Image (tube, helix red, strand yellow):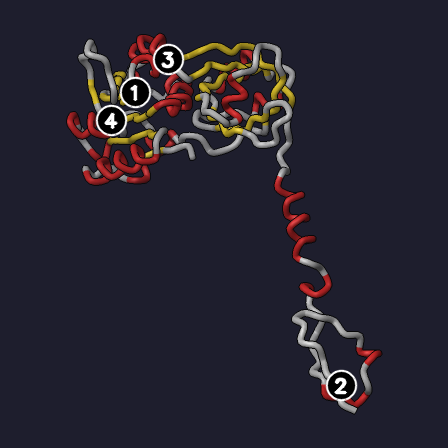
Amino acid sequence: MAVTMPALPNAYVSPSHLPMSILRRLPLRPLTVRHRFPRRRFATLAAARQDTAVWTPTPISLIEPAAESLFHISIDVSDSPDLAASYTLPGQYLQLKVPDVDKPSFLAIASPPSLATTSGAFEFLVKSVAGSTAELLCGLKKGDVVELSSVMGNGFNIDKIDPPADYPTVLIFATGSGISPIRSLIESGFGAEKRSDVRLYYGARNLQRMAYQERFKDWESSGVKVVPVLSQPDENWSGETGYVQAAFAKAKKIGSPKGTGAVLCGQKQMAEEVTSLLVGDGVSSEKILKNF
């Protein structure tokens, strides 16, 4: 008796319903995991594992404008000593969640680690971007509670450009809110006063968008020469214009490439072009520090 098998891909026909003569001619194939467990189940299990971070509720203690579209935000971590103590190196960052929003925002910590241990605070410089978690964060007020992940990242490995006697030149580059972890680096101290040439090239569209101007004097006193660079200045601006990589290319003045280190944070194009300039001048790529 002829038996016609339906041409259905991945169809399953019970062997008990087929004559023995047909069963003898059927190829034997091992039952695979794919047959037993639909892919949808694995996708669900994978999604369930994605959010494994430990979140700590913390209140906002201060929120105020820092510059156009930038906000200074301080978060009280005094009731979370383990979280505060986990911040040990300038350049580290964490994730932050605002109420009723699942998608977190990655933020570099702007304050030095010492502020977390002495005052129980994390400070951030946050750019308000339309439609983002950061925009919602900037719209909150003092007392509102946000959730913080554990501190992440290796920070800026300053050991690579120490001791100061061996690396007398340190060139620092930042654009926009990328100045945030650079503030932490400068105010944590990295022996700038013991080095002969420490420059910070800090780029923004104009002075209205340049945060931390009130700190420049203190940074200069610590041994860091601040070079503001404006891409769209007004007619009264007499300083550097364009982009930080162009301002650096014009100045150069690297005395000893082997004794030079660099720290970068900001736009990808800036980081790539500055790295290319430095390496082209003989600076070791291992001495060019980034926090991500």
* SS at badge 2: loop
**Residue that mark 4 sits on:** 243
Residue 267: percent from left, percent from top: 34, 31
Q: Relative to 103, does residue 222 appear above or below in the rendering?
A: above
Within 10 Å of the Cα at label 3, are there few (<14), some (14-19), or many (20+) other Cα atoms? Answer: some
Q: Nearer the viewer, mark 3 or mark 2?
A: 2
Q: Nearer the viewer, mark 2 or mark 4?
A: 2
Alpha carbon distance from label 3 to label 2: 82 Å
* SS at badge 3: loop
Alpha carbon distance from label 2 to label 4: 77 Å
Residue 142: percent from left, percent from top: 58, 10
Alpha carbon distance from label 1 to label 2: 78 Å
**Residue that mark 3 sits on:** 212
Question: Observer-nearest residue: 35 or 124?
Answer: 35
Give the side of residue 63 with respect to residue 229, left or right. Answer: right
Within 10 Å of the Cα at label 4, are there few (<14), some (14-19), or many (20+) other Cα atoms? Answer: many
Question: Observer-nearest residue: 235 or 90?
Answer: 235
**Residue that mark 2 sits on:** 3
Q: Relative to 87, does residue 283 appear above or below in the rendering?
A: below
